[in-house]
Image (spheres, grey):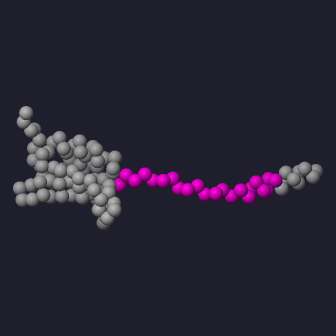
Amino acid sequence: MADLRKKVSMLQVMDDIKPYITKHFIAQSTVHERDIAAICQILLPRYKNVKLLQGLTNNKPDFRIQVKGLFGTDEKRFEVVGGDKKRPAPKKKSDLGWIDQLEEIDAALDDF
């Protein structure tokens, strides 16, 4: 069975996944963790010279796309966002002073 995948340039890869990339003014472009599976499903069945990698850069998750070309390998790196499960903020102890006020009012009403 023949491999129907074709070779591609990084420009075409970036065009294919453009909807999944968030560009920031100065910061590195990012991709959301939930979109990584969709990107894999778009690129891997189509192209034979594309390699997808996940790893850590400066203790932050990243997603890398490598496209092997005639003169070397072109690589794009994206920071992965939305992957860390945020812990709920600790609940603040509520001010229970209102209970004391109610008890005082209740005691005052009992005096009548």
| Residue drawn where x is 31% and y is 47% of the image | 35
Which one is nearer the viewer's eye here, 105 or 90? 90
Q: Which residues are magenta?
A: 81-103
Which one is nearer the viewer's eye here, 5 or 59? 59
Please indicate, yes or no, whether residue 23 appears anywhere in the rendered image: no
Q: Position of residue 71 (x, y in %)?
A: 6, 59
Q: Is residue 98 left or right of residue 25?
A: right
Which corner quadrant holds the N terminus?
top left
Residue extending farthest right: 112
Residue extending farthest top: 1
Quarter of the view holding residue 55: bottom left
Q: Position of residue 77 (x, y in %)?
A: 24, 58
Q: Main secondary structure of the magenta part?
A: loop
Residue 59: within the magenta? Answer: no
| Residue drawn where x is 93% and y is 52% of the image | 111
Q: Is residue 27 left or right of residue 75?
A: right
Quarter of the view holding residue 104: bottom right
| Residue drawn where x is 16% and y is 49% of the image | 50
Residue extending farthest bottom: 26
Q: Position of residue 45 (x, y in %)?
A: 17, 41
Q: How many marks?
A: 0
Please indicate, yes or no, whether residue 80 appears anywhere in the rendered image: yes
